[in-house]
Amino acid sequence: MYRVMIVDDEPEIRQGLRLKVDWESLGLTVAAEASDGEEALKILENEDIDIVLTDMLMPVMDGVSFLDACRSRYPHVRILVLTGYEDFRYARAALRNRAKDYILKPVSSDELSAALQAVVRELDEEYLDRDERARIAWRLSQYYKEMREQMLVRLVREPIGDDRAVRDRLTTFELSDWDARTIRFATAGLRRFRADTAEKTPRGVADDPDDRSPDTLRLPFVMLSREFAETKRIPAFADGQAPGLFTFLLPDDPEAIRRLLDEYADCVRRYLRADVAVGLGEPVAGYRAWKEGYTSALLAWHLAAGGLGGGQSLAEEPGRNDPSAAPPAAVDSESAILRLLDEGKLDVLEQAFREELSAAFADSRIRFVKTVFRLHLLVDAVARTFRVPLGPEESLWLRPELAAQMETPDQAVERLMQSVQRIERSVRERAEDAERLRLRAVEQFIREHYMDDLNLTDLAEKFHYHPTYFSELFKAKIGKTFTQYLTDVRMENAARLLKETSLSLWDVAELSGFSSPSYFSSKFKRMFGVSPSEYRQSVRRQETSEKFDGA
């Protein structure tokens, strides 16, 4: 709704104008009234007004002076002049200040509605252009790139929220086309080598006495990969849970994929003097399958980095790579491991590992390795929740060849249980810290998923708490209720968007996790004491003042 102010010194005229028009049907609301130009300027200073309907002959400050001041201070406001005097001076003032219409009293309902409709159309076009420019500027900003990457990471880890909300996010981050096509994930990471070992030196690169391990090159590798993805206009992300790796989304076109990955490998070799290993995942269609596609790319990378796969896709015998053909996993989530840890049922967890790995081993070698890899990912996630460092022999990230070296289910179970027992000992030895660390993981999860439809019950289940106990514990340890904390995180992000972008109120609300702009506006004003628009204006004024002060 566009906001209108009526300026006339006669109250009955103002009331009559209110009654002449079906304001709501035009997308308008009468937000303010003023009896003269001076009062109207004070209202403009403190409120967002889009259209001013003003008389010319008024006390204190007449229409001519008001139009001059309004044009100078508030050039964005549209003005309709409504007067009972056909005076050349008034008409000239209206033209000089670019009034949208000059209407003589008495005015009919149809005439006034037509004039207002013309202004509304002009405002609609301007707002559409402005919103589009704002979106383009935002999409070029670093903040947008960060949020888009975070969105991708969330989708490939654990899609949360109803389908409509997720698809809205996909549209916002220009990912809808990728959701509609068959794609492959390609995960890349540097091969490990020593500069003094000839056969492991990158092809075409002279020996270098400096330490050029993947660990020391991790940051430049990710930066170079990100720049390559931006140049090729393909979605890509770095997953914090997979350090040192970078993943691209690619259309399922084998020849185009081969050319692009060859070019990428040459780029890494040229600028970092290192070889890159790439794992190509299985084809998947639709965002709900992205998690499986990403997991298959991670496994393909591990096989390639361990010298066992060459980076090829992980296709198996017909039917065997169909998820519906496999039995349901006994341990299918981080929360399942958390639950058994909390209950002290390590024997039950070990048996679940053994049954799942034995079934996979009996089915095929590749399914066995994929299962080993998936279970290690879950155990790694639990270790990170409690800040328990795993040793080199336990981490698939540090030793990607470990998964493929396991020859039997018993070997795999033994390695998994070594990690689980390390976590269990650490948690037992520092029980109070363990609770604190788990709540810190809850906070981190909220900060990563604030855009999604989060609720206390689902979060309690994920981190294995009873909802009532979780609610009380959260408030006692964090100092706020779950709802207050989630709202604060969302408002923190909304304030940043209002400050750093020109996005519309609708976009800001959506990107901050609020269900509607009106609900967002009311919550924002309750928290900050001003409306979102007023907050944005105050930030702009402060930035302008600081700019002039520093000049």
Image (spheres, rainbow, N blue to C red):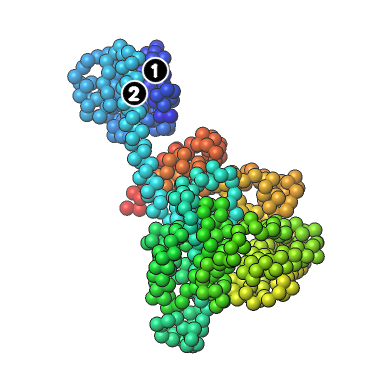
Which numbered circle lies on residue 424?
A: none
Question: Could you say which quadrant of the image residue 418 lies in?
Answer: bottom right
- Quadrant placement of the N terminus: top left
N-terminal of the two: label 2 or label 1? 1
x and y, in percent, of residue 214 in the image: 51, 75
Mark sitting on residue 21: 1
State the residue at coordinates (66%, 59%). Answer: 326
Residues at marks 2 and 1, CA–CA distance in whole angstroms: 9 Å
SS of the residue under disc 2: helix
Q: Which residue is mark 2?
A: 116
Q: Note whether 220 is above or below 108 in the view shown.
A: below
Residue at 52% of width from left, 37% of height from top? 516
Mark 1 belongs to which amino acid? Val
Q: Residue at x 60, y 76 (%)?
A: 401
Badge 1: how crowded within 10 Å, few (<14), some, or many (20+)?
A: some
In the figure, is residue 371 to the left or right of 44?
Answer: right
User: Which element is circle 1 on?
Assistant: loop
